[in-house]
Structure formats: C-alpha cells, structure tokens
Image (cartoon, rainbow, N blue to C red):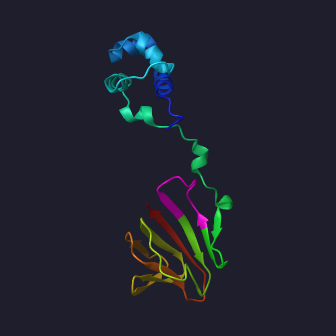
Amino acid sequence: MSDLNIGEKIAQIRKKQDLSIKDLAKLAGVTSSLLSQIERGLANPSVNSLKSIACALNVPLFTFFTCEVNKEELIVRGNSRKKVVLPGSSDVVYEMLAPGDKDNLEFAIMNLAPNTSSCNEHIHHKGVEIAYVLKGQVNLYLDDDKFILNEGDSVKVPIGTNHRWDNSYEKDCKIIFAVIL
C-alpha cells in the first residue's frame, strides 16, 4: 500500500476523461482547490469526497485503491517457467505456472517419474487443492483411502486432508494443480 497514490489515480482518470480540475470539482461537488490539493498529495480526501469524485468519474470507489499491474509480468512463458525440484528427489519436478509468490494461489504442474511419490509421508495444507491429471495414471491417497486417477480425471482435496500422490506405474505422470490458500 505504500506506493498507493489516490490523488495521482484521480488525476489519471480525470485526464483520460478529458475533464479539467474545475469540471470534475463541479461534478463532484467539491472545490477546485481541494481537488487540486488531493491530486498533488497535499490533502487527504474524506470518504464522502472520494465517493463523490468516484461517482462524478463514473468509476467504482475501489478504483482509487488499486495499483497498476505490469501486464507483461502476468505471463509465464512455457520455456521460462520456474522449476522446483524437491531435495532428495530429482524424479519429482514442479513447474510453476503462476507468476510471483505473493498471491493466495499456487498453480503448478507436478511431473512424477515412474515409481515416485510427491512425498514420503502424507501432507496437508491450509488451502483447498484442485488437481487434474494431464498425462498418465496416478494413485492419490486421501487419508487412508487410495484412488486411481487416469488422464482427464480431476479431484478436489479439502483443506487439511492428508494426501499423497504416487506414480507406481511405468510411464511419466503430469498433474496440473492449484492450491487456493
């Protein structure tokens, strides 16, 4: 939030709509002086002033509280995915599909070589896991139950459920999964 500048955001939207400070001030029911000070970061607007300005600009109030995103950074190219190899097991490789690590979402492809498991012990996490078998066949252990999933099958693993993926077959297995924290 430290790089959030509400006044700057108001000025950008106002200029895009080809409005002068005087025009926007009149539409919003605030003084031109106040609006100018807000845009220059010299005054903090009240919630009521922000609501009036948002209404006059015909934008949702939350627009002033969002940061610009570099859209190029939203793309993960297939040939430049981050790969994670778990210590002690070069036969389990995760390809990260989502950029960054600051979201409440993990999105990846798990590559399981034949006769390997995602982990030695069952694990669980604080989020829900949704998975889809892209290639091959895999055993999924949910608590004490074993399920065989084939290419095209999908599963939802509830929060806190102990689970483990196991490829006890002769072919590679690829599983795309998302964990929503």
Whether residue 96 appears in magenta in the rendering, the answer is yes
Instruction: From the top left corner, tell me how far across and down residue 102 is, in percent.
Output: 53, 52
Magenta stretch: helix, strand or loop mostly: loop
Instruction: Please say if 146 is above or below 27.
Output: below
Q: Identify the residue at image location x=55%, y=89%.
A: 168
Which residue occupies 45% across, 78% down? 163
Residue under the point 43% across and 16% down? 35
Could you tell me residue 95's position as x and y percent?
A: 61, 66
The quadrant where residue 173 appears: bottom right
Counting labels gives 0
Q: Nearer the viewer, residue 104 or 17?
A: 104
Residue 123, above or below 127: below
Q: Position of residue 156 (x, y in %)?
A: 39, 71
Q: Is residue 41 visible?
A: yes
For residue 65: magenta?
Answer: no
**Front position in the image: 107 or 152:** 107
177 sits to left or right of 158: right
The span shown in magenta is 95-107
Give the residue drawn at x 33%, y 25%: 55
Asked whether the viewer can see residue 19, the reply is no
Q: Quadrant of the C terminus?
A: bottom left
Q: Nearer the viewer, residue 119 or 173?
A: 119
Q: Position of residue 75 (x, y in %)?
A: 59, 51
Q: Is residue 1 above or below residue 161?
A: above
